Amino acid sequence: MPISLDDPKKLRQLRDQAHQVAMNMLRPISRTYDRAEHEYPKELDLLAAMIDGISESGASSGAGASGVKREDADDEGSGVKNGTNLASVLGIAEMCWGDVGLLLSLPRQGLGNSAIASVGDADQQARFGDVWASMAITEPDTGSDSAGIRTTAVLDGDEYVLNGEKIFVTSGDRSDAVVVWATLDKDLGRAAIKSFVVPKGTPGMTVERLEHKLGIRASDTATIRFDDCRVPVANLLGSPDIDTSQGFAGAMATFDNTRPLVAAMAVGCAQAALDLTRDLLDRAGVTVDYDRPAVVQSAAAAKFLQMEADWEAARLLMLQAAWMADNRKANAMEASMAKAKAGRMASDVTLSCVELCGSVGYSEGELLEKWARDSKILDIFEGTQQIQQLIVARRVLGLSSAELK
Amino acid sequence: MLLLRNLRPGGRPGGKYGIARGESRDPIGYAVAALNRLARSDLLDRVGLRKQAEQTVFTVTRGGFRTATTAGRAFARAGRRGEAGRRASRPPSRGAFDLTPTEDEQMLVDVVTELAAEVVRPAAADADVACATPDEVLTAANEIGLPLLGVPEALGGISEERAVMAGTLVAEALAKGDLGIAVATLAPGAVATAIATWGTDEQQQTYLPAFTGADVAAAALALTEPRPLFDALDPATEARREGDDLVLDGVKSMVPRGADAELFVVGARLDGHPVLVIVESGADGLSVEADPSMGVRAASLTTLTLDGVRVPAANLLGSDDGTTYAGCVRLSRLAWCALSVGVGQAVLDYVTPYVKEREAFGEPIAHRQSVAFMVANIAIELQGMRLLTWKAAARAAAGKDAAREIGLARKLCSDKGMQIGLDGVQLLGGHGFVKEHPVERWYRDLRAISIMEGGVLV
C-alpha cells in the first residue's frame, strides 16, 4: 500500500452526495435562517429523515455525529482502515460548505450523539441511538477550564439528582436529550466529572433562554437550568467509579473524536469562501497560477495561494486525525493540531475573502460576510485555539498540566 | 577625486552591496566609504594589523573569480539516438487514504536517518564555514545509493518503481541532518533522475553509467537565474539551433557543486518554449564562479555562465514543448519542500529539550505559554507542511497531476518554514544568534525554500 493522501476512493461518493445536499438543500435556506434567528428550520426534518435512510442502507459508512465511534477490521484486508471517522469529517466538511449553522441544527446529529457514541456502553448506544442529543458542558463561570464545573450529581437510590446551570448548549432547545457534565464530588477534581443523559421533559430541567449571536444563527444556543433534576443511574455514560488515576480521560475522550469534526466544519466553511472568492476574482480578471511564484502574481492571487495552501494543510491535518481514529491510533495531539490549524485558518480565509471581494464581500447580497461571522465560533467551541495549543504543547514538550498551566 | 572615481564602480547604488538605486551618497557617506576602502586594502595585512583568523580558506572561495568548468570525464556516446529510454513503472494504488510508508521506503528512511544523525549533522557546522561538503560525507551518501534513487533497476539504479515518494522521504530525512550537505549529496541524483525520467535511450546509455558505477560523477541541475522576480518557467537563458547543434547563452545561479560538476542539465528557452539541455563540463564557453550565499553553503553554490556553448541537438532532454521542463521544475520544488520539512523537524527537535532545560524566573521557560505555544505552532505547521508535501509526492508518484499540490506545498513550506526558522532562533534568544547552536544556520537555510529552483529533484 503506497502512501496516499487523496480522499479515499470508497468515500468519494459519500462526499459528493453530501456536497449535492449542501448545495441544493442548505444553500437555498442559508440566508433565510441567518436572518430568522431562533426559527426552527423545518426543512431539516426532511433532510434528517433522508440521512437516517442513507445510514440504515449502510451507504454512508456511518457518517455524521455518531460516526466517531471506533471499530475494528480493516479494508479489504489491506491492513489500513478508512472508516466512519474519515467518512464523518468528509461529510461534515461538505455540509458546512453548505451552512455551518444548519449542520449544527441537523436533528440526531448533535455533539451529544458523538459523546454517547464515544463514551456510552453498548446498552446506552442502543437506548439513545435514535435520540437527538445536545451537549452541555460550559457554565457561566467555567469555559475552557471544564474541570472547574459546579453542576453536581448526587446519588439518591437508583437516581442521580442534578443541580446547576449550563450555557451555550447547541440545539439545547430543539434536541430530545442533553448530555450534561456534572461532578459527583467537587473535592475529587477531574476524575469525579461524569456525563449524564437527561431526556427533555425531565422535571427540574428548564430551557431558560436562547442567545443572539455573531454567527451560526440558524443554530439555537440555549441556557439550561437543572433544579433537583432526577435521572436513572443507567443514564450515566461510562463507568460511575471515580478513578483518580484515570483523571479526566473518560469524559475528555469525546473531544479526541469531536475535535476533528469541528476542524471539518472550519474546512467546509472556509472552502465555501474560497470557492466563491476564486470565481469572483476570476470574473475580475485575476487568475491564480500554481506554477508561477506568488511574488510575480497579483497581490490578490498571492493572497489566494497562501489561503489555499493553509486550507489544504488544515484539511490534511483533519484527515490525519480521523484516519488515526479509524485505525485505533491514539490521536489526542493530532486532533488538537487539526482543530487549532483549521480554526485559525477559517478565520483568516473567511475574513480575507471578504476583504478581497470588497463591498461585494461585506454586503448581505453575498454569503461571504456570513461565513466570516460563522467561522469565528469554530476557533472557540470544543476547545479554543489556546486550549488546542496548550494540549499540543504539553504533548510535544512532555509536560504535565501542573508544569505547563 | 581619483579616490571618489575609484569608489564609484563598487559602491554605486543599484550596482553592488545591496544598495537600491534610490540611495544617494552624501559627504559623510563618501568619507565612510573611503575608510571602508582602506580597511579592505591588503596594507593592514602586510604590516600584520589584521588578525590571522580572518584569513581563512573560505575567503578564497568567496573571492569570486571565474574559472572554466572542470574538464571531467569523457562520456562515450552509446545507445540509440532518438529512441525513447526505459521508464520506471508506477506503484499500484488501492485508492485508500494511508500515511504508512512501504517497507522498502521505511528501510531507506531508517538508513538515511542514521546517516543524517551520525555523519551529516556532525559535519554540518564546518561544511557551512568551508562552503564545501567533505569528501567522506559525499562518499558515504554515494555508498548508500542516494544518486541512484530515481534510476530504475533496469538502468543500473535501485528502484523498481518511479520513486518520487521514496525520494521525498529521503530528502526529508537527510535535511534533518543538514540542508547544505543534503543538497550537495542529492545534486548528482537530480541529474541522474532527470535523465532516467526523460532521457532517450542514447542519453541514458551515455550518461547514466557515470552515476551507477563506483566513481559517481558530480552533476548539477541548473534552473535558477540571478534576477529579481525570477520565474523559473520563463528562463532568460537562450538556446538556438545551428545545424545539428544547440548554442546556449545565459547565466545560471545557485548551481550546487558547479565547480566539481562533470555534467549539467541546464534550463533554457528554445523556440519560445523552456527546455532542458544536457551540457558536459569542459565545453567551450562554459565557466563557473563561486557564489557563497546566505545559507545552503555546504552545497558549494556557484554561478554557471554559458557563453556560446555548443552541444549536439540530441542533448535536448525530453520534449521541446515546455512540458518536460515544467514537470522538472515541479518535481524539483517538491524536493525542496521535502528538504524544508527535514530542516523544520531539526529545529523542533532542537528547541524542545532546550526550552525544557533553559531556566528563567526560577523555572524552565517551557512552562510559560508564550514559549510553549511557539513550540506547539512549530509542531502544527510542520506537520501541515509534511502532509501537503506527502500528498503532492504521492500524486506525482502515482502519475496524477500534482501541479496544484506542489504549488501549494511550495507556498506553505516557504512561509511556514521561514517562520519556523525565525522562531527557532527566537526561542534560544541571544544563544540562537551565535554559531554555538545550529539554529542560526537553519534560519539562513530555510530562507532558500521559495528561492531555489533546480539543484535537487525527486
Image: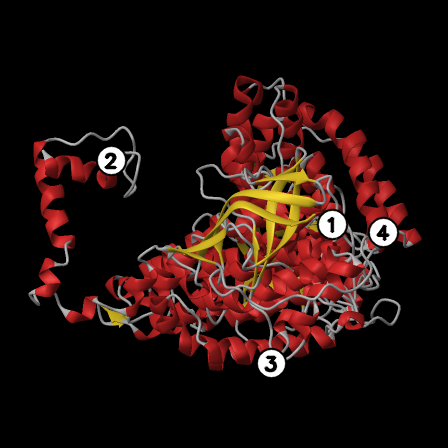
Say what secondary structure mark 1 lies in.
Answer: loop
Q: Nearer the viewer, mark 4 or mark 3?
A: 3
Amino acid type at image mark 2 = Arg
Which quadrant would the N terminus of chain B be assigned to in this image? top left
Residue at 21% x, 67% y: name it.
B55
Say what secondary structure mark 2 lies in.
Answer: loop
The alpha-carbon separation of the residues under discs 4 and 3 comes to 51 Å
Do the dots labelled 1 and 4 sit on one chain?
Answer: no
The location of residue A256, given as percent across then percent down, is 62, 62
Which quadrant would the C terminus of chain B be assigned to in this image? bottom right
Label 3 environment density (alpha carbons within 10 Å; few <14, some 14–19, many ≥20): few
Do the dots labelled 4 and 2 sit on one chain?
Answer: no
Question: Which residue lies under the disc numbered 4?
Answer: A60
Question: Which residue lies under the disc numbered 1?
Answer: B318
Say what secondary structure mark 3 lies in.
Answer: helix
Name the chain under label 4.
A
The mark found on residue B143 in the picture is 3
Name the chain under label 3.
B
